[in-house]
Amino acid sequence: MTFRIRRLVPGRRVGGRCVRPTAWNRSAPSCTRSVRLRGRIARELAAGTNRLRYRGRLAGRRLRPGRYMLVARARDAAENVSATRRAKFTIVR
């Protein structure tokens, strides 16, 4: 399993896309965009249901308080990749 973390941050809807807020697009409708953080968590797990504890760290650093999305993808011995699964979570302090 490979787990990646994305931070959910404010954005502005411009041209059908959610982009970084700037002085030029401040009057555009707001949206939420996700920014991929450096690092990943890779674990070899047995087939079936597994449970992992996540301590809010990535690449040796604590995550800042805010909203995040966990993106999980499995790969088997034959290099077949599963569909991506996502779960949102919040770091409070």
Image (cartoon, rainbow, N blue to C red):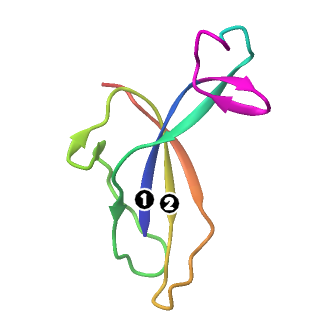
Report if residue 18 lies within the magenta region.
yes
Disc 2 designates what residue? Answer: 72
Towards the viewer: 3 or 11: 11
**Residue most toward the left?**
60
Q: Residue at x 33, y 53 (%)?
A: 39
- Of labels 2 and 1, earlier in sequence is 1
**Residue most toward the front?**
24
Q: Which residue is drawn at 50% across and 91% down?
A: 78
Q: Residue at x 42, y 69 (%)?
A: 50
Marking on residue 38: none
Q: Residues within 10 Å of mark 2 (few under 14, many from 20)?
A: some
Image position of 57 with respect to 13: above or below: below
Mark 2 and mark 1 in contact? Answer it, CB < 8 Å. yes
Disc 1 designates what residue? Answer: 3
Three-letter residue code for mark 2: Ala
Q: Where is residue 32 in the image (x, y as percent from the top left)?
A: 62, 28
Q: In this view, does 15 lie to the left or right of 2?
A: right
Q: What stretch is highlighted in magenta?
A: 11-25
